[in-house]
Amino acid sequence: MTESAQVGGRYVLDRADFPAFLDGMRAAGYRVVGPTVRDRAIVYGEVRAVTDLPIGWTDRQEAGQYRLERRSDEALFGYNVGPHSWKKYLFPAHERLWTATTTDGSFEVRPEPDDATPLAFLGVRACELAAIRVQDRVFGLAGDPTYARRRRSVLRVAVECGQAGRTCFCVSMGTGPAVHDEVDLALTEVLEGDRHYFLLHVGSDRGARVLTDVPLRPASPVEEGAAADRVASAAASMGRSLTTTGIRDVLVNQPDHPRWAIVARRCLACTNCTMACPTCFCQSTEEVPDLSGEKVERWRRWDSCFNSQFSAVHGTSVRQSTQSRYRQWLTHKFGTWHDQFGESGCVGCGRCITWCPVGIDVTEEAAALREPARPTVPSASKGTTP
Amino acid sequence: MAARSLPPAAEEMPSPWAPVPFRVAQRTAETSDTVTLVLTPARDAPEFPFAPGQFNMLYAFGVGEAAISISGDPAAPGSLVHTVRTAGKVSGALAAAGPGTIVGVRGPYGSAWPLAAAEGKDVVLVAGGLGLPPLRPALYTMLADRGKFGRIEVIYGARTPKDLVFYRQVQEWRARTDLRFQTTVDAADRSWYGDVGLVTARVPDLRVDPANTVAFLCGPEVMLKFTVQALVAKGMTEDQVYVSLERNMKCAIGLCGHCQLGPEFVCRDGPVFRYSDVRRYLTVREL
Amino acid sequence: MTAAPTPGALRLAEHRFFVGAPSGLADRLEPLAVERSYAFGDTLVREGDIADRFVLIYEGKVALEIVLPDRPSVTIQTLGGGDVLGWSWLVPPPEWWLDARAVKRTRTLELPAGPLRAALDAHPDDGYAFLLRLLPVVAQRLDHTRLQLMDLHGR
C-alpha cells in the first residue's frame, strides 16, 4: 500500500519493490550510480536494474587482500566498501576545468559547461557519508565551483552496513556504521528467514520526492529493532581499531620517530592508498594545447603526495625520501587535517589497508607511533640473570 | 568537530581557475635571466588592488601557470608589476613575453607583510636575490607614508653586482636620507664599491632599536634562518620577524595540496608568516 | 687616574670587538694602539707580507681581495666599522693571505703583533679573554664562507 513518505519518517521497503525504488529515482531525473561487480571487485557504476547490484556477493578483505565471495543469501548490499569511492563522481580523477581560445591577440576562457544529469548515489556507507562531508569542507573552503555544482545535485542514498570488514575501523573514527549524517535517504537491509526488506529513513524533501510511486509502509518497532540489531552487530565486529585520543600530537610532534624509517622500508610510494582514500584531495592541473596552438584545455587530475615531484620547488623535491612522503600522508590524514579543517581526514573505511600492495596498516602504524622510540642498541635486560 | 559546511551554490561562485587576460605594457630586463613586466587589463576591468607581499598566478597561454609575487606599487592598482626569473618552462615563457603579449592573471593570493603592525616602529627589510621584488611593494607603501614609521633599513644581497634587480631604483634609494639601503654581493671585482659578504654580516651594524623593530625577510630559506639568528643576536625576538616562504604553489586556493608545510597551506596561510609561528617546521628535514 | 680622551680620538674599549670583554682588557692594550687613517685606494695589507698587526676598523670600508694571475682580482668580502681585520698575525706562519684595500676613507686602531702577543702571553687571563673575542669572528667568517659556497642566490 503506497502512502506519501514524510521527511523524518521510517518505512519498510520490500525487496520485491526495490525496482520501483530505482524507477522512482530515475523518474525524478537522477542517473543512479552504485555498487556493481566488475573485474572481480565491487565498484561504483551505473545501476539500470536491480540485477546490476552485487546480489549475493560479499567482499573478504585483509591488509593487502581483497576477494569477492558468494554469500549464502541474496543480499543486495552484503559487502563493505570496494576500491572506488564516491569522490570519483564529485571530484573526477580527470576532468576539464576550462577551454580557452585565442581571439584578436587575446584569449577567452570558457569554464566547463554544467550539463551533467544529477546523480543518485545508491549505497553510500556511513563512513562514505563522512568522507563526502570531509571533502565538502575541503572543496567548500577553496571555493571550487565544479565540486559544488555536482555535490548540490546529488541524491545521497545511504545503506547502513550489516557487517564489518576485516580492515574496517569506522567505530574508532566515529563515522559509522550507523548513519548519523544528514542524508536524503537511509536504508538498512534486513534478511530474516524468508523475509528480505529495507528499513528506509527519509532525511530530506528531495529524498521523499523519489518515493512518490514506491510502495512503502510504516516500519513496526520490531522491524526497526531488527535493522538496529544488524547495525549493532556490524559495530561489534570491526576488523581494526585505532586510538584517536591525542593522535594529532602523536603524529605532528614526532617527525623523527624511528617508526617512519621502518614503514618506509615497506612503502613502495605507489599512491594506491591516496587513490583509494575517499578524502584525499591532492590534485594537479595540466595544460593541453591543440596542434594549432589556438585552443587550450585546462585539465585537472588526481595527484598524490607520494609522487616524487609533488613537492618540487624549482625542480627539486622537498620530500625526496619515501619516508618523508609516507610521514606527510599519515601526518596530514590524522594530524594536520585537524589544524586545516577542524576534523580528522580519516573516516575509518580501511581502503588504504586493503589496497596497499604490501599491506601497510595505518592502524598498526598509528599504534607503533605511540610507542616510545626504541633505542637502536638494545639495553641490557633486567632480571634475567638468576 | 568543525561545523559542517556545504559548498555554496555554483552560480554564486566565479571560477577560481580561470585566468583573466592582461596585456604586457612594458618589459624591462633586470639581469641576464630576470625581467620586470608591467601588465594592464586586456579588457575593461576594475582596478587590481593587492597587499604588499601577495602573489598572482601568471599564465602563459598554452604553457601553464607559475606563482609570481607582485613587485609593483599598491598605490597604483591600475597596472600590475611582476618580476620574473627564468627558472622553468612557464617562467621562461613569461620572461620572454614582449610588449603586447597577452598573459593570464589569477589573484591576488596569500598573506601580506604586516605593515599596520610596523607603524611607529623601526623596520628592517632583508632581501636575498629575487627576494627584493616581493618586498618592494612594502617599501613603496612605507616611503609613501614615511612619517608613520621609524628608521627604515634595507639590506639587499645578490650573487654578483650583475644580479641586482631594480638597479637604477636601488641607486635612488641608496641616495635617500630617510632610508638606509645597503647592497651586498657574494663576490665582485674592483668596479663594485658596495659591500661584499652575506646580508647577515650587515645586521650587527643596523641602527635600529631592537625592542621596537619589525623585520621582513625574503630570500633563500637558509638565508632566512641565518638572518633571524643575526637579528636575535642583535636583540630582537623571533616574533618580531616575518618571512616569505616558497613552496610548490599550484592552485593558490589551498586545494591542490602541493605547498603544504606542516599544517600550513603556504599559498593561502602564507607566503608571509611570522617566523616564530613556522620556525619549528623549517628545522624538520623534508617536511 | 686616566686622562680624558682627546676629542675624536679612537679608543679600544669603544670598538665592538671589546664590547662585553672583561674590564680593563682594552685599557691594558691601549698603550700599544696606533691610530691610522687610509684614503680611498690605499692598501692596508698585501698578500705575502708578514702579518705584523691586528687591525680594528672604526669607520670606512675595506675590501679583502684575492689576486689572480689571469683575471681581475676578486673581492670576497668587505669589512666596515666594528669589524676587525684577520687573525693571520696569530697563526703561524704570520703571513697575509689576502690583499686588504680601503675603498672608502678608513680609520683604524692597530696593535703591533709582537708586543700584542707578548702582552697576551704575559697575562694568560687576558690572552684567553682576547681569544674568546677573536674566535667568534673566525667562526662567523667560516659560516659565511660556507653559505657563499652554496651559491644560494644563484638558484
Image: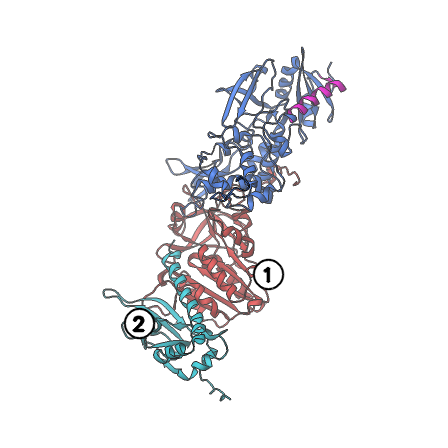
Chain colours: A blue, B red, C cyan
Identify the element where label 1 is drawn. helix
Say which quarter of the image contains residue A345.
Answer: top right
Q: Amino acid at mark 2?
A: Trp
Percent position of residue B88, x then y: 38, 47
**Label 2, label 1: how far apart the Cα atoms are:** 50 Å
Q: Is residue A23 above or below residue B30?
A: above
Please report, as a chain letter, where disc 1 is located. B
Quick one: SS at disc 2? loop
Which callout, 2 or 1, points to the residue nearer the camera? 2
Is C25 rendered above or below residue A100? below
Residue for badge 2: C96
Q: Quadrant of the N terminus of chain A?
A: top right
Chain identity of mark 2: C
Give the overall secondary structure of the magenta segment. Answer: helix
Q: Is residue A219 magenta?
A: yes
Residue farthest top in this picture: A194
A222 left or right of B179? right
> Picture coordinates of residue B112 (x, y %)?
55, 55
Whether residue A119 is situated above or below residue B77 in the rendered picture: above
Q: Is A203 situated left or right of B221 in this image?
A: right
Residue flagged by tag 1: what amino acid is it?
A: Ala
- In the image, residue A176 lies at what x, y percent? 64, 29
For the point 47% across and 68% down, the residue is B204
Span colored in magenta: A216-235
Residue B116 is labelled as 1
Quadrant of the drawing holding the C terminus of chain A: top right
- Measuring from the top left, give residue B28's x and y in whole percent: 39, 57
Front-lying residue, B7 or B103: B7
- Dot 1, crowdedness within 10 Å: few (<14), some or many (≥20)? few
